[in-house]
Amino acid sequence: MGYSDRVKHPGILNDILFKIVFGTSSSEPTMRALVNALLDLKGPDEIVELTMLNPISEKEYIDEKGPIFDLKARDSMGRQYNVEVQLRPGVGDYLKRSIYYLSKFYSDQIQRGDSYHDLLKTVSISLVDFNLIPDTKEVHSTFLLREKTTGLVLSDVLELHYVELRKFKLSKPQELRTRFERWLYFLKFADLYGPEGTVLPENLVQEEGIAMALESMRRAYAKDPVRELIEAREKAERDELNRLYTAKLEGKLEGKLEMARALLAAGVDRETILNAAGLTATELDSLHS
């Protein structure tokens, strides 16, 4: 069975595929197009050259013990970019985590004895598939160092960008008006265009970098070792979720049994205990076995 025959393509936001598509030295043009679109960089601010600071090789992801890290890049003006995809909220305090890593990335530019003048603008871009900032309906939120009362920007050397995919409601290619919307649509729905022979909408084909990203995703997923690793990790995640769910159910049952023990000790009748504790007759009888 070929990969195009499978029921569900994992899509480009899969951790392994994302880093292969955007994180290798050969994918620098695709990464440049992505960052330009997400940050809407134009004119003198547009990135014309981008170098990956931590390029990965596909072998690092074929090996299950390979490193997992964010994608880091620097443009020809010295500006640094950290791009990360996070699909699940269970990563500690994600906001504090992203601030910490941005600060570290910024400070790592200089060593002891270097000048602070050498510190250049550092930007963090987080693509998250959960509701991270509940106080806004905006898909894209940008945070800078500002004066609290006047809103005066102290400096633009640090920028935090959060793109919340759950808040992106456009679901039809013809609705897309900006390069940000076109890239976001592609990132969110790339699984629909994963199988060979699936036609990419014309306005996505014309957007710089998207066709290259799709072809790179297809090539990577067509390789057995990459696909097998993705499937193994998906199975491991499902097994872990099932383990946690089972533990939760067992914890609830133990709580009910503890209540039943107390009621039995107090001389409460069986029918009342069944109703109060929410137990089945078999579960209550297990206390006597």
Image (cartoon, rainbow, N blue to C red):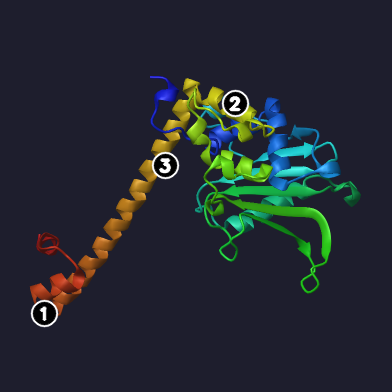
Quadrant placement of the C terminus: bottom left
Observer-nearest residue: 145 or 102?
Answer: 145
Q: First in sequence: mark 1 or mark 2?
A: 2
On the image, numbered disc 2 is attached to which residue? Answer: 216
Inspect the image, locate mark 1, and give the three-letter code of the amino acid beneath it.
Gly
- Where does the image place residue 85, in percent across and percent down from the top left? 58, 44
- Where does the image place residue 115, in percent across and percent down from the top left? 91, 49
- The answer to whether residue 216 is above or below residue 253 is above
Mark 1 vs mark 2: give the one in front.
2
Q: Quadrant of residue 2?
A: top left
On the image, numbered disc 1 is attached to which residue? Answer: 267
Label 3, label 2: how far apart the Cα atoms are: 25 Å
- The answer to whether residue 115 is above or below residue 195 is below
Q: First in sequence: mark 1 or mark 3?
A: 3
Q: Is residue 99 visible?
A: yes
Q: Which mark is residue 237?
A: 3
Secondary element type, mark 1: loop
Asked whether disc 3 touches disc 2, contact meaning CB atoms under 8 Å apart, the reply is no
Q: First in sequence: mark 3 or mark 2?
A: 2
Query: Among all residues in the image, which is located at the extreme front?
Result: 174
